[in-house]
Image: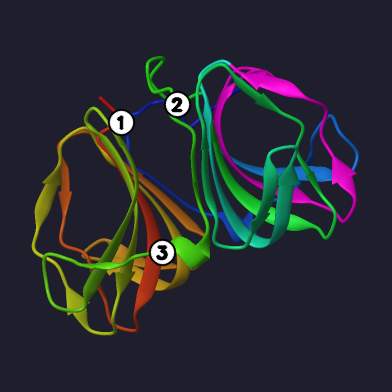
């Protein structure tokens, strides 16, 4: 399956308008944002676990990034409440489950083969830092080479300068409404902007976004 595989094109999707599709495991469904391949695909998805759903142990050849959007996610390594960021490096394995049910934002097979550090950042460990303009706060989640992943919190009325995305930019809106000169993006919107694209972002009402940059060369 090929879905939004051309990284040279800008893509904007409202994930909450997409139909849930069954995965191979009962009780696990997904809304597919981008995908290249079959079940062993490079993919970006919103994934939903019903209470008690489990997934068999499996290996991540090119790693996995997860943000827990709601509920509680778990595997044999721990329990991860809403707001947790997880990076499982290439070659890692786990057997995921959710006793209570949860919703996740998941990126599969996007990591560099040499990016071997596992990262888990729970909400209790967050340490926000002042961003480049007033009203902007940044929480760095991960960095490897030219790729950076962060949470960015925008106070109402915050405006950022126009800038270019070297290596591209990917955004998932977690709360509120993110904006730029091209449109308004409410909670659940996924935006992928290609290498050397540009925009001038702002947020009138305030928002929190997940941002990944530098990985689309």
Q: Alpha-carbon distance for marks 3 and 1?
A: 24 Å
User: Label 1, on which residue?
Assistant: 215
Tell whether label 2 touches label 1 (CB within 8 Å). Answer: yes
Q: Secondary structure at mark 3?
A: loop
The number of numbered discs placed on residues in the rendered structure image is 3
In whole angstroms, how far apart are the C-alphas of marks 1 and 2? Answer: 8 Å
Percent across and percent down for residue 5 are 45, 26
Sooner in the amino-acid sequence: mark 2 or mark 3: 2
Q: Quadrant of residue 54?
A: top right
Task: Kindly report which numbered mark, 2 or 3, lies closer to the viewer in this rendering.
Answer: 3
Q: Please tell me the numbered disc located at residue 126.
A: 3
Which mark is on residue 110? 2
User: Magenta stretch?
Assistant: 34-60
Quadrant occupied by the C terminus: top left
> What residue is drawn where x is 77% and y is 44%?
29
Where residue 153 appears, x then y in whole percent? Answer: 33, 70
């Amino acid at each position: 399956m090929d879905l939004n595989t051309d990284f040279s094109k800008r893509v904007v999707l409202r994930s909450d308008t997409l139909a849930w599709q069954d995965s191979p495991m009962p009780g696990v469904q997904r809304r597919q944002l981008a995908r290249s391949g079959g079940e062993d695909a490079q993919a970006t998805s919103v994934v939903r676990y019903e209470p008690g759903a489990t997934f068999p142990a499996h290996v991540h050849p090119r790693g996995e990034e997860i943000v827990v959007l709601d509920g509680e996610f778990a595997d044999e390594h721990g329990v991860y409440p809403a707001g947790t960021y997880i990076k499982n490096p290439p070659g890692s394995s786990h057997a995921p489950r959710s006793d209570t049910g949860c919703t996740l934002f998941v990126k599969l097979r996007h990591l560099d083969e040499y990016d071997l550090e596992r990262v888990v950042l729970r909400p209790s460990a967050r340490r926000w830092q002042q961003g480049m303009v007033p009203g902007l706060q940044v929480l760095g989640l991960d960095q490897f080479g030219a790729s950076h992943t962060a949470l960015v919190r925008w106070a109402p009325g915050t405006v950022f300068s126009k800038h270019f995305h070297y290596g591209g930019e990917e955004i998932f809106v977690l709360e509120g409404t993110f904006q730029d000169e091209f449109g308004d993006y409410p909670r659940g919107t996924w935006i992928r902007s290609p290498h050397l694209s540009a925009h001038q972002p702002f947020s009138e009402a305030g928002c929190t976004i997940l941002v990944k940059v530098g990985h689309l060369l």
